[in-house]
C-alpha cells in the first residue's frame, strides 16, 4: 500500500513538471506572437491552454483523493498540499500567457505593442521565458538556487512593469487609447506571471526544507 502511495506522489511531481513545460511553451509562443504579430502562433497558445487546465483539474482531483483516502502527515502532507498550490499557480501562468496571445490576436495584422515600447516588451518576454524555464527545471530537480534566480527575474519584470507606467504617464506618450490599454494590460500580465512563478518557487523551497518564507524572514530579524 505504501509503495502505491509513493508512486502516486512521484506521479504528481512528474505531472507538475509536465504542466510547467506546457506553460513554458505557452509564454514563449505568446511573446513571439506579440512581438511579431503572428496570428497562427497566438491562436495556438489560446487553444493549447485547455491542456494546461486539464492537467490542473486532474492533479487537484487526485490530491483530494489522496487527502481523503491516505490521510498523509508530515512530508507526505507537504507534498500533496504543495501540489495543489503549485498546480493552481501554473494554471494561472498558463492563463496569463493566453491573455498575452489574445491581445496579439485582437490587434492582428497590426502589432499590439507600439514601436516605442517594443524594446521593453522584448525584455519582458525574455525575462518571462527565463522564469518559466527555471520553474520547469526547479520542479524537476529541486535545486534551490534556481528559486533565487526566479525571484531575481521577477524583480526585473517588476522594474519593466514600472517602466511601462513611466512611458504611459510621461509627456512624450503618443499612443492611441487602444495602445494605452494594451500596454497597461500586457505589462500587468507579465508582472503577474513572474509573481506566480515566485509562488511556485517558494512552495518548492518549503517542500524541500519545511521552512516557509515567513519563517526565514522572522529568523533574519
Image (cartoon, helix red, strand yellow):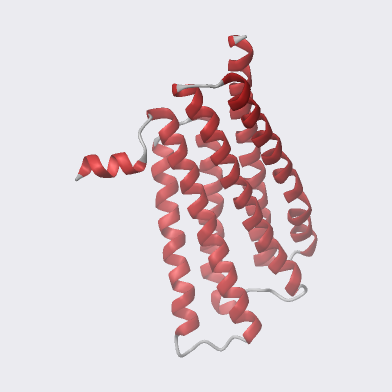
Residue 80: quarter of image: top right
Residue 143 seen by the camera? no
Q: Residue lying furthest left in this view?
A: 221
77 left or right of 114?
left
List x then y, in percent, for residue 85: 54, 41
Q: How many numbered circles are shown?
A: 0
Identify the residue at horizontal 42%, vertical 28% (top origin): 208
Identify the residue at horizontal 75%, vertical 71% (top origin): 106
Q: Depth check: 113 or 195 in front?
A: 195
Residue 144: quarter of image: top left
144 shown above or below 129? above
List x then y, in percent, for residue 192: 52, 58
210 left or right of 115?
left
List x then y, in percent, for residue 147: 42, 41
Q: Quadrant of the C terminus?
A: top left
Q: Depth check: 178 or 117 in front?
A: 178
Q: Depth check: 114 or 83 in front?
A: 83
List x then y, in percent, for residue 9: 59, 23
Identify the residue at horizontal 61%, vertical 78% (top origin): 181
61 left or right of 116?
right
Q: Quadrant of the N terminus?
A: top right
17 shown above or below 11? below
192 shown above or below 168? above
Residue 101 seen by the camera? yes
Q: Depth check: 165 or 219 in front?
A: 219
Amino acid at each position: 500500500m505504501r509503495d502505491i502511495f509513493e508512486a502516486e506522489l512521484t506521479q504528481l511531481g512528474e505531472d507538475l513538471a509536465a504542466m510547467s513545460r506546457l506553460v513554458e511553451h505557452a509564454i514563449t509562443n505568446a511573446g513571439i506572437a506579440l512581438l511579431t504579430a503572428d496570428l497562427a502562433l497566438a491562436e495556438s497558445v489560446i487553444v493549447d491552454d485547455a491542456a494546461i487546465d486539464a492537467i490542473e483539474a486532474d492533479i487537484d482531483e487526485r490530491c483530494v483523493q489522496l487527502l481523503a483516502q491516505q490521510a498523509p502527515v508530515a512530508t507526505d502532507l507537504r507534498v500533496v498540499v504543495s501540489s495543489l498550490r503549485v498546480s493552481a499557480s501554473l494554471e494561472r501562468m498558463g492563463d496569463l500567457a493566453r491573455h498575452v496571445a489574445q491581445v496579439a490576436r485582437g490587434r492582428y495584422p497590426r502589432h499590439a505593442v507600439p514601436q516605442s515600447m517594443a524594446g521593453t516588451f522584448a525584455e519582458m518576454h525574455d525575462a518571462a521565458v527565463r522564469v518559466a524555464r527555471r520553474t520547469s527545471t526547479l520542479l524537476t530537480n529541486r535545486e534551490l538556487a534556481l528559486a533565487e534566480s526566479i525571484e531575481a527575474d521577477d524583480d526585473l519584470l517588476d522594474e519593466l512593469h514600472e517602466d511601462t507606467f513611466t512611458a504611459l504617464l510621461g509627456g512624450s506618450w503618443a499612443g492611441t487609447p487602444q495602445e494605452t490599454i494594451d500596454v497597461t494590460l500586457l505589462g500587468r500580465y507579465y508582472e503577474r506571471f513572474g509573481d506566480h512563478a515566485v509562488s511556485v518557487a517558494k512552495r518548492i523551497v518549503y517542500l524541500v526544507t519545511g521552512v516557509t518564507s515567513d519563517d526565514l524572514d522572522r529568523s533574519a530579524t
